[in-house]
Image (cartoon, rainbow, N blue to C red):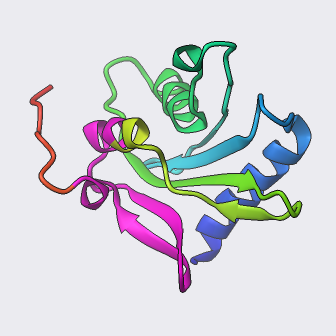
Amino acid sequence: MPSEDVSLLRLAEQLLTKVYVHGRHEVATALRTADGSVFTGVHLEGSCRRSSICAEGIALGAARGGLPAGAPLHVDVVVSVQIKPAGTFRIIAPCGVCRELISDYSPDATVWLTTDDGPAPLRALDLLPEKTRRAW
């Protein structure tokens, strides 16, 4: 993992350490936009599953809000972490909805996930084979 991506990983880990509540805030995301800006998000679990919001979506919204008016949202890298029951962090893959969201805005973004061989980068669009592309 390149050092600038390790920095995102550490930022997500620090954020999750700060806010972690079992069953409520279990995932943190850090992402970097094309201009080098970094944004974060924390998973918000709702009392009804449908009201829950993933950390990736919150980080994407923060990134969009941090851009100048009219500037497109271009994300370069996304890293999301969760704390395993043993108390250690692991990089996790975005859920299906977040894969759609990330690839809608930044199909070429690098998304880190954990494989059998350790952390691996994948292109956002490659996480959704045969994705229908919508023209914005």
Viewer-side residue, 12 vs 129: 129
Position above or below: 81 against 89: above
- Residue 30: x and y in percent read 62, 47
Let me know if residue 116 is in the magenta part: yes
- Residue 121, above or below 13: below
Q: Residue at x 57, y 24 (%)?
A: 53
Q: Residue at x 61, y 13 (%)?
A: 48
Viewer-side residue, 2 vs 20 = 20
Q: Quick check: 68 left or right of 42?
A: left
Residue 7 in picture, x, y percent from top left: 70, 63
121 is within the stretch colored magenta: yes
The quadrant of the image that shows the C terminus is top left
- Quadrant including the N terminus: bottom right
Give the residue drawn at x 67%, y 69%.
Answer: 6
Left or right side of 75 for 24: right
Q: Nearer the viewer, residue 124 or 85?
A: 85
Residue at horizontal 72 percent and vertical 50 percent from the top? 12
Report x, y in % for residue 101: 35, 35
Image label count: 0
Instruction: Report x, y in % for residue 23.
Output: 78, 32
Point out the stretch of residues depicted in magenta: 100-128
Q: Which of the 4 quarters of the picture holds residue 21?
A: top right
Identify the residue at the far bottom of this view.
Answer: 117
Query: Closest to the observer: 51 or 76?
Result: 51
